[in-house]
Image (cartoon, rainbow, N blue to C red):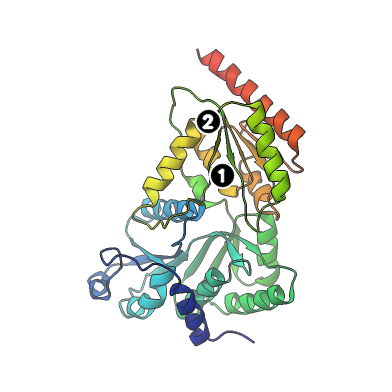
């Protein structure tokens, strides 16, 4: 049975009660919305409120891209909390040329149900608007719940009359084309790849590890610990970083946090990561990187967009020996380039 809008709101409200409220000065105000009623707008929504910098980078890159390519539009960022509160006021202040853009990422599916339910709420609420789903990855699990959630999502997407779907990998593109033959479906890279955060660092040294410890990890906890120990015994220095930083980030603080992480990456001689945005951050900072697969197709198919970069190496079946050899080759290559430049 499909969720009603009231049920979607109830589920979201239950989830929002667990989250910290935004400071007053950060929240969009209903009173300020009428001031924009005569301005055509792009409502950029589904922005994250959690600590994953990969998702915040997607939001930031999407904002920058829209700002550059649609200068005549006012870009309004509305996150997951705000969209339930502001949906009705936004519709009241509608301009005829308004567009809704939903940020992309890996939360299309049943692994992150609150994000998926909010996506469906947006599509139902803004049914008369052009809606663009920016490049996303879909993953519905092969479970009874996963199949039920997939059917619900398909029905919601299918009934939006002006929906553009963007897939950031081939599996998602195939799924979208199969289920939505009458909708516009594009295959586009992750929005973060539109950024260039490379700068000349005085010296790169050591190895940085950026490994998952959640339900998307391909390596078991034992394999991950053994790999960490092996690298720490072989290289010096070895640092540990993560794209989930353990503190709340919003659109007012995201660039500071992202810039700090990108600076760390630019100082490393090699990064080892199984995170999609660990790989993408290395691509946009021009940091040598050994990429390990994740549990699904997301990393391996995402690699297709950056496979031409000589400083990124993908390991489909990683182990201690293959990781060590990949690090050695990247260090050797980067060292030779340094000598040539000198």
334 vs 7: above or below: above
Question: At numbered mark 2, what does the secondary structure look like: helix, strand or loop?
Answer: loop
Residue 131: numbered disc: none
Residue 82, by quadrant, is bottom left
Q: Position of residue 142 (x, y in %)?
A: 75, 69
Q: Position of residue 156 (x, y in %)?
A: 58, 78
Q: Position of residue 219 (x, y in %)?
A: 71, 48
- From this viewpoint, is residue 222 visible? yes
Residue 179, by quadrant, is bottom right
Q: Badge 2 local density, few (<14 within 10 Å), some, or many (20+)?
A: many
290 vs 146: above or below: above
23 vs 145: above or below: above
The residue pinned by badge 2 equals 268
Q: Distance between the residues labelled 2 and 1?
A: 13 Å
Q: Residue at x 51, y 25 (%)?
A: 204
The residue pinned by badge 1 equals 278
Image quadrant occupied by the N terminus: bottom right
Q: Residue at x 36, y 81 (%)?
A: 88
- From this viewpoint, is residue 197 visible? no
Q: Residue at x 30, y 77 (%)?
A: 93
Instruction: Tell whether 257 sits left or right of 166.
Output: left
> Are the residues flagged by discs 2 and 1 in contact, CB closer than 8 Å?
no
Of the pair 307 and 146, the residue shown nearer to us: 146
């Amino acid at each position: 049975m499909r969720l009603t809008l009231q049920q979607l709101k109830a589920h979201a409200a239950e989830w929002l009660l667990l989250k910290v409220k935004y400071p007053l000065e950060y929240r969009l105000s209903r009173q300020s919305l009428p001031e924009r009623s005569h301005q055509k707008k792009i409502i950029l929504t589904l922005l994250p409120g959690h600590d994953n910098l990969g998702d915040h980078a997607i939001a930031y890159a999407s904002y920058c891209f829209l700002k550059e390519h649609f200068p005549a539009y006012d870009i309004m960022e509305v996150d997951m909390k705000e969209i339930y509160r502001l949906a009705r006021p936004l519709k009241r202040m509608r301009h005829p040329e308004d567009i809704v853009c939903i940020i992309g990422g890996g939360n299309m599916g049943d692994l992150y149900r609150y994000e998926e339910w909010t996506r469906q709420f947006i599509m139902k609420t803004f049914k008369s608007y052009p809606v663009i789903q920016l490049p996303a990855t879909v993953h519905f699990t092969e479970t009874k719940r996963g199949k039920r959630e997939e059917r619900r999502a398909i029905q919601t997407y299918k009934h939006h009359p002006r929906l553009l779907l963007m897939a950031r990998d081939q599996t998602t593109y195939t799924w979208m084309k199969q289920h939505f033959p009458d909708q516009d479906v594009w295959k586009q890279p992750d929005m973060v790849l539109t950024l260039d955060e490379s700068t000349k660092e005085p010296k790169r040294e050591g190895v940085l590890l950026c490994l998952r410890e959640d339900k998307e990890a391909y390596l078991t906890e034992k394999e991950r610990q053994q790999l960490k120990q092996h690298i720490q015994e072989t290289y010096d220095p070895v640092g540990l970083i993560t794209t989930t930083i353990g503190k709340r980030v919003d659109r007012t603080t995201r660039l500071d946090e992202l810039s700090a992480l990108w600076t760390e990456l630019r100082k490393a001689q090699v990064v080892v990561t199984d995170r999609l945005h660990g790989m993408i951050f290395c691509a946009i900072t021009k940091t040598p990187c050994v990429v390990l697969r994740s549990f699904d197709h997301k990393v391996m198919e995402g690699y297709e967009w950056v496979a031409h970069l000589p400083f990124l190496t993908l390991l489909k079946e990683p182990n201690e020996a293959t990781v060590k050899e990949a690090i050695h080759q990247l260090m050797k290559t980067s060292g030779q380039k340094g000598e040539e430049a000198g």
